[in-house]
Image (cartoon, grey):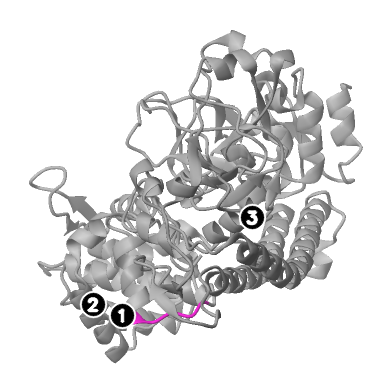
Amino acid sequence: MSEMQAFIAARTPPGWKTRPLWALFRRRKRTGFADEELLSVYRDHGVIPKSSRDDNHNKESEDLSGYQLVTEGALVTNKMKAWQGSIAISRFRGIVSPAYYVYEPLSDECDQFLHYLLRSEPYIALYGRISKGVRVNQWDLEHESLRNVPVMLPDLATQKSIADFLDRETARIDQLIAKKERLAATLAEREEAAFLGVVTGQDHSGPKVYSGVDWIGDIPAHWSAPKFTYIARQETGHTPSRKEPSYWVPQECVIPWFSLADVWQIREHNRIYVSETAEKISQIGMENSAARLLPRHTVVLSRTASVGFPAILDVPMAVTQDFVGWICGPQVRPKFLYYVLRSMKPVFRSLMMGSTHQTIYMPDLRAFRLPLPPLNEQDAITAELDRSIGSFRVAAEKIVESVGKLREYRASVITSAVTGQIEIREKMPAVSSRPDRSKFRVTIGAEIVRQHQGNPKFGRVKLQKELYLAETHLGIDGLQGNYLREAAGPLDRALIEETEGGLEAAGFYRASQRDGTGTTVTYLPLANAGQHKAELETLLGSKTDELRSLIAMLHDLDRREVEAVATLYAVWNDALMDSQDFDDAAIINGVLTEWHTEKSEKFKSDDLSRWLGWMRRHGLTPRGEGPRTAHTATRDMFA
């Protein structure tokens, strides 16, 4: 017995079997799908659209033709981060980096159980044991090692019971984590709000004058409002060529180099001073690039990806091109400039609004202006802000500690369940298997198509939107959609593909584009059209009438109108799930600026306001339940 087999055997409960991973999954590399959604594997979130997060700073290749296709149910792993938990079963169709492994399923084992099992603590520890490499951040899990990993399996019924139990338990824990994170965000907002009034002298007695800058407003008459570049020397950074090995000799890389890999220090932890970096560069690399060594107390600001987070360098270091720096002159204290930047979040947001590229460009940076009091007042202001944020930080640290404990508990519950340490059947005797997603999609899709037969305003887009509203508004969670904020969103391509394929396979309806790809889709009745009704009643019970009422309500809306309604509903519903304050203006702004840029081309504020009124009159108002839409370009306005 190999060391790997012994490791798993020692953790396999009596009565369970083990099978090598190659018996459950087969590696398959399919390329040439450059137009598919780009996916990524996260330790905490599994396989999700890369664009749904703003904390993944790995740059994709300009040519995506070599990226690998991932289908729903595939096992995906980042071979260099498997030991950290970057392995998961995908619920999305898309493409991943050529450096990933993609495996298609071969068995009828419960994929949700496998998803939890292969991401559990014992397996993550095993991946660390069998990965190879000189240094930790260079560890690599070879395919031959992964394919031979023993997978411990109970009977199928137990697998489903465990998966259902963990779906419920992790959802409950995740809700608690989300609430605490929202509280932390609220504290952060209050902290930020405290900065603006103080750094602009709003509470200062005496005469005031207009600064000439909208975000600053009036300032004490003896202050000024110069450009940053008048009181500090602006610097930026660079990355030495990765193609030149001599620039990256490990023993010569001794110069701290602040990059997006370090931005968590100032984004999540709000550190004012930074001294540690994930990477270092060499003197020769710096000399042969536009990077330069910035002195201690240089004030830096992240200007790409995670935009608008400042820090003060506590040691001399270089930075990447993702940061801009200011070396302060005698008129400004570094810490005062830091607090000014912390007050400029509205400025950063306005620069980002409607932009698909999250970047503050150099001309905008050179135009930045700040309220500038005398040095003694700067010192008093920084001391006041240091005191005020202290109370916020204490409360925030308690929340962070609490969230950490919840995450640890979540991991322990998963490990205990998938290794048979919890008697799921005794604890949850009424556990049922997951709903048959395909049956829900096909049956409900058949009812929607049936009611729209002969309706010239009906097509694929309207079918998608009515399926989304059926799941979100009526609570028909058996549809199990994963909806993206696409140009025609909320959109789940896989849902439509499975629905249309199932409609044809069942002999109900066939999707047809008589005028070719890109034209209107019609649904032609087949031999079994209309014979889904008994199944519909069985699946939905009393919700059958609710579904029919929803379809009838939307019957006369054309493609553009139903898209407007569904998008407004999604933005509104997501906000309710986040427990955020909002009004009609915020919802409309969310549609126009927080989705695909085409939304602002399709819809105007007045149109969306009118449809919000229509939704209220018809009772089509969300309750903050159902699936949350995933982002594809920009951050959520409510985040």
Q: CA distance from mark 1 to mark 3?
A: 57 Å
Find residue 507 and report its horizontal and vertical position in percent: 28, 55
Residue corresponding to mark 3: 335
Q: Which mark is residue 270?
A: none
Mark 1 is surrounded, within 10 Å at the Cα level, by few (under 14), some (14 to 19) or many (20 or more) other residues, namely some
Q: Amino acid at mark 2?
A: Leu
Contact (Cβ within 8 Å) of mark 1 with mark 2 = yes
Q: Amino acid at mark 1?
A: Leu
Residue 208 lies in what quarter of the image?
Answer: bottom left
Q: Name the residue rendered at 51%, 82% in the picture.
A: 206
**CA gap, disc 1 and disc 2:** 6 Å
**In the picture provided, is 54 more to the left or to the right than 545?**
right
Q: Earlier in the sequence, mark 3 or mark 2?
A: 3
Q: CA distance from mark 3 to mark 2?
A: 57 Å
The answer to whether residue 88 is magenta is no
Q: Between tags 3 and 2, which lies in front?
A: 3
Check disc 3 and give the amino acid type.
Answer: Lys
| Range of residues picked out in magenta | 580-584
Q: Position of residue 419 (x, y in %)?
A: 83, 49
